[in-house]
Amino acid sequence: MQEIDGLTLRGAHLDRNKLNSSSDYQVFSANRIGGRSDAFDFAGGDYRLTPALTASLHQGRLRDIYRQTFAGLVHTLDLGGQRSLKSDLRFARASEDGGFRELDNRAFGALFSLRLGAHAVAAGYQRISGDDPYPYIAGSDPYLVNFIQIGDFGNVDERSWQLRYDYDFGALGLPGLSFMSRYVSGDNVARGAANDGKEWERNTDLGYVVQSGPLKNLGVKWRNATVRSNFANDLDENRLILSYSLTLW
């Protein structure tokens, strides 16, 4: 096939996966909707329409469980002077595959991020519609704008909003030190005959990457999450994450 500038194609057939908590490979299962399958296929691509605009279209199939189509647009507007506005729009639709059960889900998300030098602020909106929650493969991350540390805000009929703030302390002469805080609030979650489910989650990250010396590229991050809900368990969580970046070639 002739190479097309700006086009990236992807595709794969998988018959097993291995979860972080498992020592062996297992067949796939679907989060939220149940079901097990020994085949996952996906194909799609990203096309850079302009240097600032990229369009995406992908199709996935968990055999005999569900099919899902994703379309997305990402645009970055350079405002000059270390300022930019990034717009990320996503839409996904899922339906049944095979005879497992009927399935109907649609997910729309929009995330707008404004960078002003060392500061970045973002606002997002996500809407789930249809008769079912957002389905995805167990052990994977759902590609939703409001999927954060704990929750994905992908329940039936859920509406959710996100506010986020980032700061790079390099502007104060502390390169490698970073801060992030975000808050997502969801409501309208279907609970039986009523749509009165509500939940919220707050995340805070404080991280540092060593800039020089024998420990250069060693990173340490403290990550905190608070979750509150009137239909699921409340949760408070702290994580300490160590990382190391190594150039292989």
Image (cartoon, grey):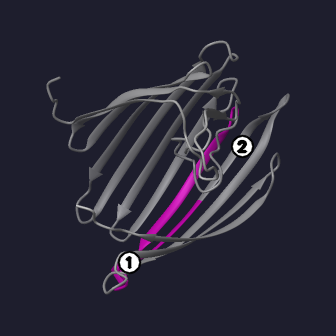
- Name above or below for residue 41 compared with residue 113: above
Label 2 residue SS: strand
Q: Residue furthest front?
A: 24
Which residue lies at the image location 39% right of the left edge and 57% below the top edge? 114
Q: Taking 160 as reference, is 165 above or below it?
A: below
Residue 201 lies, with reference to residue 240, above or below; the image says above
Q: Is residue 130 visible?
A: yes
On the image, the x and y values in percent for residue 200 come to: 70, 54
Report x, y in % for residue 211.
33, 81
Q: Quadrant of residue 4?
A: top left
Q: Is residue 134 visible?
A: no
The N terminus - image quarter: top left
Task: Give percent across and percent down for residue 2.
Answer: 14, 25
- Tell whether 223 sits left or right of 194: left
Going by the numbered disc 1, the residue's amino acid type is Gly
> Which stretch did the figure color magenta?
156-182
Question: Residue at label 2?
Answer: 187
Q: Is residue 218 above or below residue 44?
A: below
Question: In the picture provided, is 15 more to the left or to the right than 116?
Answer: right
Residue topped by disc 1: 176
Q: Residue 178's quadrant in the figure?
A: bottom left
Kind of residue at disc 2: Asp
Query: Residue 186 location in percent, x, y?
Result: 68, 46
Kindly identify the residue that appears in the image at 30 percent across and 61 percent down.
83
Distance Cα–Cα, label 1 vs label 2: 37 Å
Q: Residue at x 44, y 71 (%)?
A: 167
Q: Camera-side residue: 191 or 135? A: 135
* Left/right of residue 189 with respect to residue 21 in the rendered view: right
Q: Is residue 60 magenta?
A: no
